């Protein structure tokens, strides 16, 4: 899975701490998501997408394809 959270955060000029504050989570959570050590819950992913005004698949791109 490709994670674009850092890209969107940096485009806004926000630190991990600022993004964490806006989302109501810890800075460690943001770091873990950005470094692919933690997959966010669906509610958190939805809040992230809403904050950046993008869709969840724009933040978390899944390259998985089903077998034919």
Image (spheres, rainbow, N blue to C red):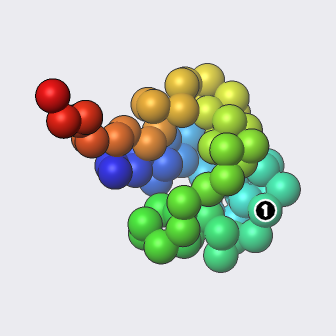
Q: Residue at x 62, y 56 (%)?
A: 40
In this image, 54 relative to 27: left or right? left
Residue under label 1, please give it: 25
- Secondary structure, mark 1, is loop
The reply to whether residue 10 is visible in this rendering is no
**Where residue 58 sits: x, y (%)?**
44, 31
In this image, 22 relative to 68: left or right? right
**Where residue 45 sits: x, y (%)?**
63, 43
| Residue found farthest to the right | 24
Q: Which residue is drawn at 62% across and 33% down?
A: 49
Does 34 sit above or below residue 49? below
Pick the front one: 66 or 55: 66
In this image, 62 relative to 66: left or right? right
**Where residue 22 sits: x, y (%)?**
79, 49
Does 60 sit above or below residue 21? above
Q: Residue at x 74, y 43 (%)?
A: 43
Please rate how many residues cluster around mark 1, counting C-alpha atoms within 10 Å: few if below 14, some from 14 to 19, many from 20: few
């Amino acid at each position: 899975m490709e994670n674009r959270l850092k890209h969107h955060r940096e485009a806004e000029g926000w630190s991990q701490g600022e993004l964490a504050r806006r989302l109501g989570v810890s800075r460690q959570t943001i770091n873990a998501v950005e470094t692919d050590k933690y997959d966010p819950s669906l509610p958190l992913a939805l809040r992230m997408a809403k904050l950046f005004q993008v869709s969840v698949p724009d933040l978390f791109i899944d390259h998985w394809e089903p077998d034919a």
